[in-house]
Image: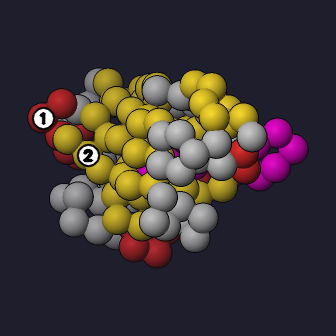
């Protein structure tokens, strides 16, 4: 399974961006998805996750109220809408996917809870 994240760019503080994540080789609806980010010199950090049905969504504390995760299975794409971006949001953003998990509600915030990931997309926020 290959994942592709896109939509990053250079923006100013306060701007918005929408990231997209697509999956190839398998039906998109088979997967729960998560977004993580990694800034230089820092560990990978959980941003948001969404389950197979789209009913359950999870967010890192810094993302609550500013970021929204969604999925559109017909389009084979998940989205991360990021509003009110801050300089501290500067990072490479990755999407990760898991096809089956009996405990996604517990494991969604750890990269070890996923089985597939791809190349990230750079988000740079200027202050």
Compared with 70, 57 (above or below) is: below
39 relative position to 12: left or right: right
52 or 102, nearer to the observer: 52
Q: Secondary structure at mark 1?
A: helix
Q: Quadrant of the N terminus?
A: top left
Q: Residue visible at 47% across and 36% down?
A: 17
Q: Residue visible at 58% across and 58% down?
A: 46
**Crowdedness near tag 2: few (<14), some (14–19) or many (≥20) residues, C-alpha within 10 Å:** many
Q: Where does label 1 land, which residue? A: 74
**36 falls in the magenta region:** yes
19 relative position to 85: left or right: left
Whether residue 91 can be seen here: no
Q: Quadrant of the C terminus?
A: top right
Q: Where does label 2 land, which residue? A: 71
Q: Residue 57 occupies which quadrant of the picture?
A: bottom left
Compared with 87, 110 (above or below) is: below
Q: In the rendering, which numbered label is found on residue 94?
A: none
Q: Which residues are magenta?
A: 34-44
98 or 75, nearer to the observer: 75
């Amino acid at each position: 399974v290959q994942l592709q994240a896109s939509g990053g760019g250079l923006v100013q503080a306060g701007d918005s961006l929408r990231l997209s994540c697509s999956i190839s080789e398998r039906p998109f609806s088979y997967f729960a998805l998560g977004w993580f980010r990694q800034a230089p010199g820092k560990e990978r950090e959980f941003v948001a996750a969404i389950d197979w049905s789209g009913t359950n969504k999870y967010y890192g504390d810094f993302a609550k109220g500013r970021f929204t995760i969604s999925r559109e299975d017909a389009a084979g794409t998940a989205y991360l809408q990021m509003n009110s971006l801050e300089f501290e949001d500067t990072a490479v953003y990755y999407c990760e996917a898991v096809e089956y998990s009996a405990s996604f509600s517990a494991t969604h915030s750890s990269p070890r809870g996923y089985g597939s990931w791809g190349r990230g997309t750079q988000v740079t926020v200027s202050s």
